[in-house]
Amino acid sequence: MAKKAKKQTTRGRKQDRSRVAGGQDYEVQYEARKTGRSASAVKKAVRKVGNTRKKVEKRLGR
């Protein structure tokens, strides 16, 4: 008998969306386009305030 597959939750996805990975170029570019700032400004903000999306956007003035 095969084991029943576990139900997949959305918990990990939601947590991932609330963060900005400063080392991932596509996430940095997305945030840069969204806020109208440069990629280097986004990376600096992530280093300064952490990787929480709300804090990064607040730091960037959005």
Image: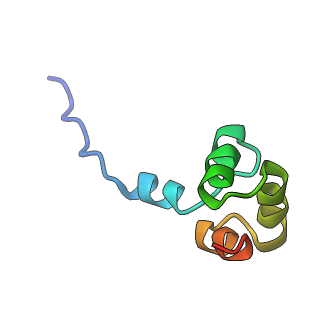
Please, which residue is most extreme toward the top here?
Answer: 1
Residue drawn 74% across the image and 68% down it:
50
- In the rendered view, would you say 40 is above or below 44? above
Q: Which quarter of the figure has residue 59? A: bottom right
| Quadrant in which the C terminus appears | bottom right
| Foreground pick, 8 / 54 | 54
| Quadrant in which the N terminus appears | top left
The picture places residue 7, in percent across and down from the top left corner, at 24, 46
- In the rendered view, would you say 37 is above or below 45? above
The picture places residue 32, in percent across and down from the top left corner, at 69, 52
Q: Is residue 56 toward the left or the right of residue 11 in the image?
A: right
| Foreground pick, 12 / 20 | 20
| Foreground pick, 2 / 20 | 20
The picture places residue 10, in percent across and down from the top left corner, at 34, 53
Residue drawn 65% across the image and 69% down it:
57
Q: Which quarter of the figure has residue 42? A: bottom right
